[in-house]
Amino acid sequence: MTAVLSRPEAPPRRRIVASPTSWLIWGAVAFFLINLAGVIASVVVNSFGERWFDTWLPQGWTTKWYATAWTEFGLLDVMLVTLEVAVLVVAISVLVGVPASYVLARRSFPGRRLVYLLFLLPILMPPITYGIPLATVLYKYGFAGHLTGVVLANLVPSIPFVILTMTPFIEQIDPAIERAARMCGARTWQIFARILAPLLVPGILAASILVLVRTVGMFELTFLTAGPDSQTLVVALYYSMSAAGIRAQQSVDAMAVLYTSSMLVLLVIALRFVNPTQLVARVKEDPD
Amino acid sequence: MSQVAWRHRLAERGIDRQLWLLVPGLACVLALFVYPFAYGIGLSFQPAEGGVFGAYRTFFADAYQRDTIATTLGLALPAAILNVAASVPIAYRMRGRFRGKRLLTTVLVVPITLGTVLTAEGLLNYLGPTGWFNRLLFFVDEPIRLTNNYWGVFFSLVITGFPFAFLLILSYLSGIDPTLERAAATLGAGRRQRFQRITLPLLAPGLATTFCLTFVLAFSVFPSAVLVGDPAGSTRVISIAAYHAAYEVYDYPLGSAIAVVMGVVELLVVAIVLGLRSLLYTGSTGGKG
């Protein structure tokens, strides 16, 4: 600390030499990662293990738990439902959200702040809070209990999410391009289809993937609205785990491993399209 | 003619046909968020017995129910504070460029994919009485009990919340112009001074937002409180109470009332933090200027 003070012209590049604080910080990171690895590994090992009681490692290795999980939980159906829900939610929320975010990005009109707040609220509220009244309403009108209800419930956080992601993205597109198109006689829908859509593709892709990840991982809303044949993978997992004792714990673990690996694939794809540091453009819009 | 003039006057105030693009999104939010919420609030004032405020009275009169607020805050606030506080120094050290930054970021973000159930399973296996963690601590006589109580839920909140907070703070830090800090260094500011006087004030609004979003995540803890916690006792959080009332007892008014209470408490915390943020922010900019 004092050493740095006594040398006014600090080097532009930070030194690699570690100070006690950075040792402490990296130590904490390492501790976190080691324990995290332990948590993940214990599930993976258990899902491949034969019998595992009071020892370091299971007594034998097997892949039978995956087969059991696949047949017992009807994983093929569950996966298909998950895929269906996710694709529908992504498609609808992009179709509905992108035009709205265009208006929010480009126009000022009376009540704009109110509209913005309205789109912000579903993200700021815990899902259970609005999920319980929403599920009640959906049951009242007969939507809940099957796919429609699950999709409708998942739209609530997804549409605002698309809008908040896309608004800054549209803001950075030069409005002069649109004006030029208008001068050449393009109508609004033509501007959308020929000018904006091609420019927006990366943003739409990023938003869709983030919504996909969120929808596949969304537990509460799906849990509250799903019927027996419209469970997504997370909800099926929760039920199989909370009803422990009936099923072998290893096959639950196998299912959890399958879930996590599919999420991991999605995340890796998402990180290819979305730069983590780009997130700030979205989040800075969040308050006020 | 008069219709055209009318349209003209509206257009001057910013209202024209383009605003129709807003309608589908607005309709969805109104139909799926505002209407159910209003319906829920209405329902919470119509309990089977006890008058208009009967459901709320039931909730606040019963200590078992009332204490869920304190339990939830006792879990969510420390978890959110820890997640944000731990992310700042780590992200601060990672804001520059160095080899393997992308890899390290990815590794730190992996827990987002775990999902509550795998985290819960993993914690039960790893921290359980015969798990690896207690095996490593062989010098302790009794295995430390870290699951099926407060700590299990707390760890699961840290595992799922930390990557999220870290990503947000990293992106806020990368958004701060590095030349400001270099200018401060040229003027003779040490590392600590640069952090305290330059980076921290600029980061403060981002910290508040991150805290709010992390807090919302932690506040709605439900699956992990059931799976790794002690859902009937020390980790009976408010979402369990709401779910129990609405879907196990089928007392929809009480369930809605608890959901409303939950929303109010949560928005209260968010409002306090955002209020503090505005205080902090103006104060710091004044000092800087």
Image (cartoon, rainbow, N blue to C red):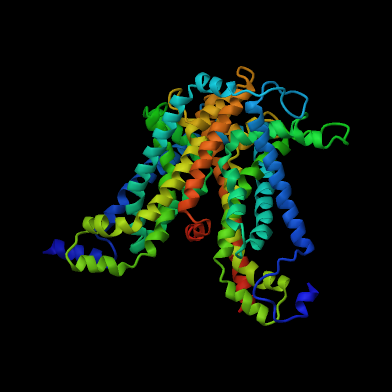
Judge whether A23 appears above or below A89 on screen: below
Where is residue A282? Give x, y as percent.
Answer: 47, 57
Between B216 and A260, the one lying in front of the other is A260
Q: Residue furthest front?
A: A61
Residue at 68% across / 28% down in the picture? B232
Residue B8 in percent (x, y) is at 20, 66
Residue sitting nearer the eye, B114 or B257: B114
Residue B203, placed above or below residue A276? below
> Seen in the image, is A140 located left or right of residue B181?
left
| Residue B170 can be seen in this image | yes
In this picture, is B9 found above or below A50? below
Residue B268 at least partly seen: no
Q: How many marks?
A: 0
Residue located 69% across and 22% down the image: A60
Residue A196 in picture, x, y percent from top left: 30, 58
Quadrant where the image shows the C terminus of chain B = bottom right
Instruction: In the displayed orientation, state which residue is furthest to the left.
Output: B1
Q: Residue furthest top?
A: A246
The answer to whether B53 appears left or right of B136 in the picture is: left
In the rendered image, residue A5, in percent from the top left (x then y), is placed at 76, 78
Is A287 or B125 nearer to us in this picture? B125
B125 w.r.t. B70: above or below: above
- Towards the viewer: B23 or A246: A246
Q: For residue B194, what is the image quadrant?
A: bottom right
User: Image point 29% across, 64% down: which residue?
Assistant: B14
- Left or right, B188 with respect to B267, comes to right
Q: Is residue B82 left or right of residue B175?
A: right
Check the picture and name the quadrant holding the N terminus of chain B: bottom left
